[in-house]
Image: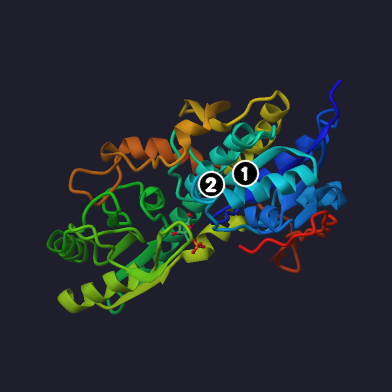
Amino acid sequence: MTKPRNAFYAQSGGVTAVINATAAGVIETARKHKRHIGKLYAGRDGIVGALTEDLIDTSAESPATIRALRHTPAGAFGSARFKLKGLEQNRAEYERLIEVFKAHDIGYFFYNGGNDSMDTALKVSQIGTALGYPITCVGVPKTVDNDLPLTDCCPGFGSVAKYIAVSTREAAMDVASMARTSTKVFVLEVMGRHAGWIAAAGGLAGTRAGEAPHIILFPEIAFDEAAFLARVKQSVDTQGYCVIVVSEGVKYPDGRFLAEAGSRDAFGHAQLGGVGPVIAALVKDKLGYKYHWAVADYLQRAARHIASKTDVNQAYAVGKAAVEYAVKGMNAVMPAIIRKSSQPYRWVIEPVRLADVANVEKKVPRNFITAEGFGITPACRRYLSPLIAGEDYPPYVDGLPDYVRIKGKSVKRKLKTPFRI
Ligand code: F6P
């Protein structure tokens, strides 16, 4: 029998309300496979923890703490936006990773992230071959943007979708109450850099004609100012008010974002934010209506108190499957959620190749957006509805959710050389 090897788990990219549920799935399952997996180390702040040999020993965490991760939002181990370049461009980073993996006898690599992270996971999986170090690498899906291909949805999305659908419905009731004498327009800005899945979820708020949101602005549809303003006016004239859900990624026909904050992250992505006030000011300027706007920002992806039960279950399931694949020796794969039916929603987890996932963005298809470009179709509703189904409330103490913090015990460093990132 071969000797068990240690494993490395890292959270990557923007965190979610349920990424820790995936961590719980990974850790609890690894603990059941002691014949294959010795210790499970987590990177402090993601891959940066691996490069700087800053590892957390998850075996120091109690079963109760790991169980509580299932209802705790954000990244318990810390996450990172840090892109490993190609092997040719920055061999030093890969050599350092191998050095750290070797020093700690790490034979399994679990990388929990979105689009860019699956690319990194794929590259790390190639290290084994290129640098002669055997490592089994599994990407574990996560992104509120819901833009990974081949999986029905991405863990993290269902909970954001639920938060946005609920918030849109509630804020719309507020505006409707005030509209006769005060606010006529409410704008909610949501995340989703290149894909409008989260904006689409706002559309779940209304189920009958005339109900909010009256306008959804998708990154997939070039912004048409005249058509938009006409629609706002029509909504105020007929309903008395207008609720708009706008994706941070909305662009002008020439490809410029309506709101670009100016800075870029490690992957070269523009930092977005602020399209809500841009849209609200446009409405005031051209139509004169009183408005309120809100930017859901981190509130939406941290909102564990109103998480989708479906999402929590899927997040845990992909973590569990990732470990099961790894101990079977399946390399360079990602557990994907495969929809078997929509009503009732039935799904299974199946492996897909990282090479087929990395760097591919799944956008909202045109047949999910109404012809004039401002709403969602019944097909889109059928796709989205099951993903927000069910509640999985965290325990509350003194009126507040009782979230857990890990001890975060450091693994003793073995390497002499520091590594600067
Ligand atoms: O990648 C997910 C995401 O939530 C995007 O929708 C958003 O643009 C981005 O992350 C924000 O990331 P950060 O927290 O690094 O600014």
Locate residue 34 relative to residue 76 in the image: left or right. right
- Which residue is under mark 1? 111
The structure residue drawn at horizontal position 27% and vertical position 69%, both measured from the top left corner, is 279
- Specify the color scheme: rainbow
The structure residue drawn at horizontal position 70% and vertical position 66%, both measured from the top left corner, is 400
* Residue type indicated by callout 1: Tyr
- Which residue is under mark 2? 117
Give the residue furthest to the top: 1
Callout 1: CB less than 8 Å from ligand 1 = no
The structure residue drawn at horizontal position 71% and vertical position 40%, both measured from the top left corner, is 25
Q: Estimate the x, y position of residue 172 in percent, counting from the top left.
A: 37, 63
Q: Nearer the viewer, residue 217 or 105?
A: 105
Crowding at label 2, few (<14), some or many (≥20) Cα neighbours within 10 Å? many
Residue 274 visible in the displayed image: no
Q: Are marks 2 and 1 in contact (CB under 8 Å)?
A: yes
Secondary structure of residue under mark 1: strand
Secondary structure of residue under mark 2: helix
Name the quadrant of the C terminus.
Answer: bottom right
Q: CA distance from mark 2 to mark 1?
A: 7 Å
Measured along the vertical axis of the image, is residue 150 above or below residue 359? above
Residue 60 visible in the displayed image: yes
Q: Estimate the x, y position of residue 19 in percent, counting from the top left.
A: 62, 49
Locate residue 221 relative to residue 131 in the image: left or right. left
Q: Estimate the x, y position of residue 138 in percent, counting from the top left.
A: 62, 35
Name the quadrant of the N terminus.
Answer: top right
Measured along the vertical axis of the image, is residue 374 above or below residue 225? above
